[in-house]
Image (cartoon, helix red, strand yellow):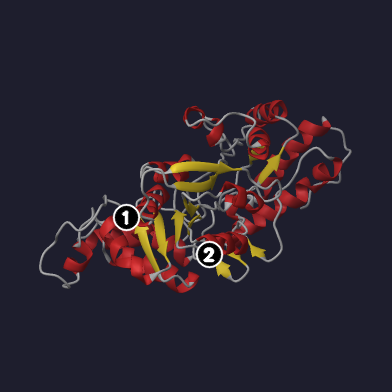
Amino acid sequence: MSYRIPFNKPFIVGRELHYMAEAVSAGQIGGAGRFVQACEGLMEKRFGAERVLLTTSCTSALEMAAILCNLEPGDEVILPSYTFVSTANAFLLQGAKLVFVDIRPDTLNLDESHMDSAITDRTRVIVPVHYAGVPAEMNAVNRIAGQRGLMVVEDAAQGVNARYHDAYQGTMGDFGCYSFHETKNFTCGEGGALVVRNPDHIQRAEYIRQDGTNRHEFLHGMVECDEWMDLGASYLLPELLAAFLYAQLENMDQITSRRQAVYHRYHENLVPLEQRGDIRLPFIPGGCTINYHMFYILLPSEPVRAALIEHLKARGILAVFHYVSLHASPMGLSMGYRKGMLPVTEDVSDRLLRLPLYFDLTDTQVDEVTSAIRNFFCGGKQELPVLIR
């Protein structure tokens, strides 16, 4: 089914198609070309990252990070249950035991106050997820990790170009993982990146990204032959996708500015409903600069959410709910978790609704979405201030 206002929509902001044609003309559409290097260099400079390696997805970046953590079977990894399944799968594939903790009711990120009680002598890694581009409390996470000798892997899939105080998301842990999926702020359809903070991990990360081989060194004339060195898989982003992505990264400020305008228009239009107690709007802690990845609302209950989704669909608008709690999923239940163990996570999972947000979304369309939401709660009565114009 097509919608007049879809949840997400691909867009071209600059020289995407031109750069893709350049890549084809240069005779290289696989990996390790100049656009891969250009994307990596741009992010390293802008984010102050030691090394950024483009990958086929954020899932790939997470899997690489998990390998780099040198986990052994039975080692424990602390992570939120309110996240995409890739966060969990990456570590499960390395034989780790997943220790889910609850999220904060304000930012919907990993609740740092639960971490001490979750840590055991088998804990090796903490995985904060920066939900909606809103940063987790990284000072607390890094302090606890430092005290306990733990590694930190940031799942910053939604946090590219967002900051926690003066540091960019993805650059504060041992490893950071980005996504350039079609639903993200900057996209190439499918893609990701691994941020490596410690220079000692860079060489091995290069091996892992190219099937466990030293192909990177071979292509740069550093060794005489291409050999199998480590674990790995085909995690290198193709040059064609990197060419598309580079045009988007060149225009990060323009893209962010438009998403910011959409975000703030949603917020201003919907504040009256929050003041009435009908919904709750996103919370942004002080000292944080978000990237306006997502605009969500929290509804009073799951039935209200379901009814609002149908109300919007009937008007040609697609809004979607987000993660189903991992601990309460069939896989989580098979690990011994059960419903009721993480109450905030389960409550948020039942009530959160994501509204359409993409670069080409117009002010008129934002007003149409918010008018439909207001109509749902007010039944057409003129009880609220008029929408901004």
Find residue 285 and report its image quarter: bottom right
All told, the count of numbered labels is 2
Q: Residue 237: which disc?
A: 1
Q: Pick whichever, 190 or 362, lies toward us.
A: 190
Q: Where is mark 2, residue-wise?
A: 146
Provide residue 23's location: percent of width, then percent of height. 27, 61
Report whether residue 17 is seen.
no
Find residue 94 and report its image quarter: top left
Residue at the right extreme, as displayed: 383
**How dense is the environment of label 1, judged by Cα within 10 Å: few (below 14), some, or many (20 and up)?**
many
Report whether residue 150 is seen.
yes
Q: Earlier in the sequence, mark 1 or mark 2?
A: 2
- The residue depicted at 48 percent of the width and 58 percent of the height is 150
Which residue type does callout 2 highlight?
Gly
Find residue 35 and report its image quarter: bottom left
Q: Residue 78: which disc?
A: none
Which residue type does callout 1 highlight?
Leu
Q: Pick whichever, 9 or 276, lies toward us.
A: 276
265 relative position to 227: left or right: right
- The residue depicted at 41 percent of the width and 43 percent of the height is 74
Q: Gap in Å between the C-alphas at discs 1 and 2?
A: 33 Å
60 relative position to 300: left or right: left
Residue at the left extreme, as displayed: 224
Provide residue 138's location: percent of width, then percent of height. 59, 61
- The residue depicted at 50 percent of the width and 32 percent of the height is 332
Assess whether mark 2 and mark 1 are in contact (beta carbons under 8 angstroms): no
Provide residue 3's location: percent of width, then percent of height. 56, 34
Q: Is residue 107 above or below residue 217?
A: above
Per the image, label 2 sits on a secondary structure element best described as: helix
Provide residue 151's location: percent of width, then percent of height. 46, 59
